[in-house]
């Protein structure tokens, strides 16, 4: 174990680079529980963290990968060698080396024991995106959004959060409307459980009215911007939208009318600093009643050498489903 493969991003504005390198244990974070990473995943945030323009990386060079699952390599801080664990959020993959390497060190207080009912690969097919989706579904349930109340909309439905939300909601018996700009993904979304496919352009243009016809019993929004503003106008009385995305923009141009005349709620979802007790309970539910169907089919396995291509694709909105990375697989491309 003198060296091992890692995908490394060097944030040099004059000559940035990223690719597979051989690194040693002295190249990863110096403290924490040593984990042999079996799987990581590809998230939109990983794409941002591996580009200069993304302004997410706080360390250079950086091993990205905001989530990981694997085995504890050395007994430490209450964890025994061989324990199966998950880690995601906090500073992983941004200001602390992440999951795109065979080994990672993670503070013990950031680690979740892998719950019964999930393999490490399944956990990363779910990944940060699925964890965010689960938080969104749970938030809607707590607000009182029930399956018999009418259809629930999922925006950005082919992405990581959207795909998982569609499957989780369908598994709970909700009538799911999936919004997407990819007509070719209709069969994929129906396979996840969506009953209706809505072209994203329907929610893209604002006609200026403060309210529109009530259509949705609730929504999981992964887009933000004008899409979120428009779906707020179409929520049923007393319903809610769980918002976690900003691929459509971080600004929200709307009025207070939907909130004060229809009593709707905007529920913010944060998956980065979720309290540990909530993390553990959410993962327990992901392994049980919220476990998405067909995880093997949803997840596409790649090695470290494929990351450059997939990270570029995800930033361009071209990814459907979930990509999971096996850092121990032989990488097909490398940089010096």
Image (cartoon, rainbow, N blue to C red):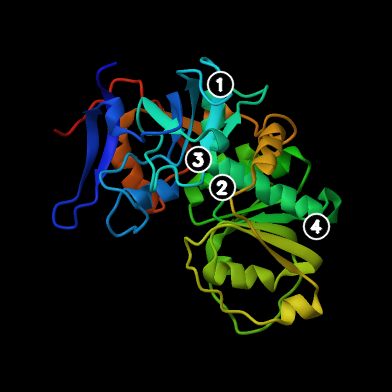
Q: CA–CA distance between discs 3 and 2?
A: 9 Å
Task: Return the x and y of residue 25 as percentages of the image width and height.
Answer: 31, 26
- Mark 2 or mark 4, earlier in chain: 4
- Mark 3 or mark 4, earlier in chain: 4
Q: Residues within 10 Å of mark 2 (few under 14, many from 20)?
A: many
Q: CA–CA distance between discs 2 and 4?
A: 20 Å
Q: Considering the numbered disc 2 on the image, is that residue within a helix, a strand or a loop?
A: helix
Residue 321's tag is: 3
Residue visible at 78% across and 64% down?
Answer: 239
Q: CA–CA distance between discs 1 and 2?
A: 24 Å
The reply to whether discs 1 and 4 touch (Cβ–Cβ < 8 Å) is no
Instruction: Determine whether 19 is above or below 136 in the image.
Output: above
Instruction: Determine whether 242 is above or below 2 in the image.
Output: below
The mark lying in front, picked from 3 and 2, is 2
Residue carrying label 4: 143
Residue visible at 34% across and 52% down?
Answer: 57
Task: Return the x and y of residue 174 as percentages of the image width and height.
Answer: 77, 47
Residue visible at 48% across and 65% down?
Answer: 248
Instruction: Determine whether 48 is above or below 215 in the image.
Output: above
Residue visible at 69% across and 47% down?
Answer: 195
Does the rendering let one see residue 26? yes
In depth, the one of 284 and 90 nearer the eye is 90
Q: CA–CA distance between discs 3 and 1?
A: 25 Å
Residue carrying label 2: 161
The mark lying in front, picked from 1 and 2, is 1
Q: Considering the numbered disc 3 on the image, is that residue within a helix, a strand or a loop?
A: loop
Is 168 placed left or right of 58 in the picture? right
Residue 84's tag is: 1
């Amino acid at each position: 174990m003198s060296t091992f493969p890692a995908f490394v991003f060097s944030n040099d504005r004059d000559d940035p680079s990223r690719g597979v390198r051989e690194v040693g244990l002295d190249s990863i974070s110096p403290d924490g529980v040593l984990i042999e990473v079996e799987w990581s995943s590809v998230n939109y945030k990983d794409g941002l963290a591996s580009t200069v323009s993304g302004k997410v990386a706080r360390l250079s060079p950086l091993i990205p990968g905001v989530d990981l699952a694997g085995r504890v390599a050395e007994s430490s801080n209450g964890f025994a060698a061989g324990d199966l664990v998950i880690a995601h959020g906090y500073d992983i993959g941004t200001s602390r080396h992440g999951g795109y390497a065979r080994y990672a060190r993670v503070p013990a207080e950031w680690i979740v024991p892998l719950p019964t009912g999930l393999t490490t690969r399944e956990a990363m097919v779910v990944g940060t995106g699925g964890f965010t989706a689960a938080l969104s579904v749970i938030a809607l349930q707590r607000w009182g959004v029930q399956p018999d109340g009418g259809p629930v909309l999922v925006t950005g439905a082919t992405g990581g959060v959207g795909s998982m939300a569609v499957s989780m909601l369908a598994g709970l018996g909700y009538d799911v409307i999936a919004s997407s700009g990819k007509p070719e993904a209709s069969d994929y979304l129906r396979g996840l459980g969506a009953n209706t496919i809505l072209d994203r352009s329907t929610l893209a243009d604002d006609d200026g009215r403060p309210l529109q016809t009530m259509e949705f019993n609730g929504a999981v929004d992964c887009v933000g911007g004008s899409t979120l503003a428009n779906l707020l106008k179409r929520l049923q009385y007393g319903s809610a939208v769980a918002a976690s995305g900003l691929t459509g923009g971080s600004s929200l141009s709307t009025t207070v009318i939907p909130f004060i005349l229809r009593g709707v709620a905007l529920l913010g979802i944060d998956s980065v600093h979720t309290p540990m007790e909530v993390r553990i309970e959410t993962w327990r539910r992901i392994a049980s009643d919220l476990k998405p169907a067909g995880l093997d089919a949803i997840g596409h396995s790649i090695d470290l050498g494929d990351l450059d291509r997939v990270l570029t694709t995800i930033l361009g909105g071209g990814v459907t489903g979930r990509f999971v990375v096996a850092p121990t697989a032989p990488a097909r491309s490398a940089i010096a």
